[in-house]
Amino acid sequence: MGIKIALIGAGSGVFSLNLIKDMCLSKYLDGSTLCMMDINEEKLNIAYTLCTRFAKEIGIKFKITKTLNRKTALKNADFVIDTAMPGGYDYMIDGWNIAKKNGYTFGGSQHIVHDESFWINFHQYQLMESIYLDMQDICPNAWLIMVANPVMAATTYFHRKYPGCKIIGMCHGSNNARNLAYTMGLDLSKVSYICPGVNHFLWLNDFKYEGKDAFPLLDQWIEEKLPEYLKEHPAKSQKISPKAVDLYKRYGVFPIGDTCVPGGGSWGHFYHTSPEVEAKWNEDPTGWYMDYFERSRKQINFMNYVAFNKEKKVTESYKLQRSSEPMIPVIEALAFDVEKKIVVNTINDKGYVEGVPTDFNCEIPAIISARGVQGLHTKPLPKPIQAWMMRDRIAPANMELEAYTNRSRDLLLDLICMDPWTRTREQAETLLNEILDMPFNAPMKEYYK
């Protein structure tokens, strides 16, 4: 008997197509249904057309439907995947421009000049909670899989407010440990690794090759091959950057995924204090994001072309191969009791990651099956890394959640004051006023008193 998966925010064509590919390659999902839902009809139609054509060419044995109505999508759902982002990138960039005018910039600015900007997070919390509450009425036994940011803060919020909730946060950042090993020239079938922490702040502290400690191999690669690698690879394509290597040398653990790259907020800010300092470390977060947005636009245009080009098969442009996304493996494990070890974002209630509060989300490997999510304890990170994690990831998220829970404008101002680029409370006040005056943020201005 099949299951039903509801995909909220299905207009994200790249994610939807990756999900379809993974479903096509699953041996457990015959007879299942994927319901694609988005409020943007144009984007939904592009994604739906692309995915249904691809699936038909492959010869699938599951059903794909679409709807603009969220409650329709949720009816009889066993799993709900949330990838939605109200307003898209435009409102985020508009806010960034306001922030930059007021002295804020890329580099450690986790809640302002980053894709977890506090004004975007507000709308995300509102949407995510409305989805969850609808689920309690329509499909109370379903699992909610959170993919949209802010994964760390949102899963923390839900586990605190709704104890026992069936919610898992997902991010593919930990997969970059494989990229590190691949860049080193290692046989990936002989590599194992663990990189614990919190979302967008993961550190490789357990790295083995053929069952033996692989950090000496990393040290050797850095000494002998890094200089040539940096010459051959421009900054935007580097899997191993000077900044990441410097952090590794400082703390003895390697930053993984979005920990120190622009996609995760370009932590830490001390590598971004001036254009000269950024040039020294070959850092260009502004250029990285502009390139990212341009690539995203090109992807959307290409997907639109492929979806409606009847003269060419979709499978000629997009091959059937498994993605690096963990959503379908998680669903297989939970729905069909196929035990798997998968990295997830879940509450640190049993102290899986030292230095993370027990009521806060952590990112860890877990055993997943029909019994649910059973987290695995991890090797402690160095105390300095634990301190940075608390200072720059956990503490600001806690401040934001307190502001949101209490509808407190003053605490929201305190959050801005925690940013490394805030110099005065007046500067923070000016930024907050201008962000709240954005037409898109009218509900937010009304919410925070």
Image (tube, rainbow, N blue to C red):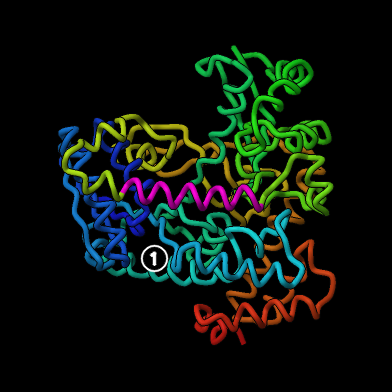
Q: Does the magenta segment cover residue 84?
A: no
Q: Amino acid at mark 1?
A: Tyr
The quarter of the image holding the N terminus is top left
User: Residue 264, percent across and down?
Assistant: 62, 49
Position of 247 with respect to 433 (left or right) is right
Please name the residue shown 16% across and 46% down the image. 63
Position of 15 with respect to 402 (left or right) is left
Relative depth, front residue between 328 and 226: 226
User: Residue 60, percent across and down?
Assistant: 17, 36
Q: To which quarter of the image does residue 306 belong?
A: top left
Relative depth, front residue between 102 and 165: 102
- Mark 1 secondary-structure assignment: helix
User: Residue 207, percent across and down?
Assistant: 65, 24
Position of 126 with respect to 160 (left or right) is left
Relative depth, front residue between 388 and 40: 40
Please name the residue shown 32% across and 43% down the image. 17
Instruction: Give above or below for 314 relative to 413.
Output: above
Relative depth, front residue between 396 and 358: 396
Q: To which quarter of the image does residue 107 belong?
A: bottom right
Instruction: Give above or below for 293 relative to 446.
Output: above
Tell me the chief SS of the magenta region: helix
- Residue range in magenta is 286-303
Please name the residue shown 71% across and 27% down the image. 230
Position of 418 with respect to 235 (left or right) is right
Instruction: Give above or below for 428 relative to 371.
Output: below
Report whether residue 48 is seen: yes
Q: Does the magenta segment cover residue 302?
A: yes
Report whether residue 1 is seen: no
Please name the residue shown 43% across and 69% down the image. 127
Residue at the far front in the pictured view: 311
Q: Which residue is identified by label 1?
A: 132
User: Residue 2, percent across and down?
Assistant: 18, 43
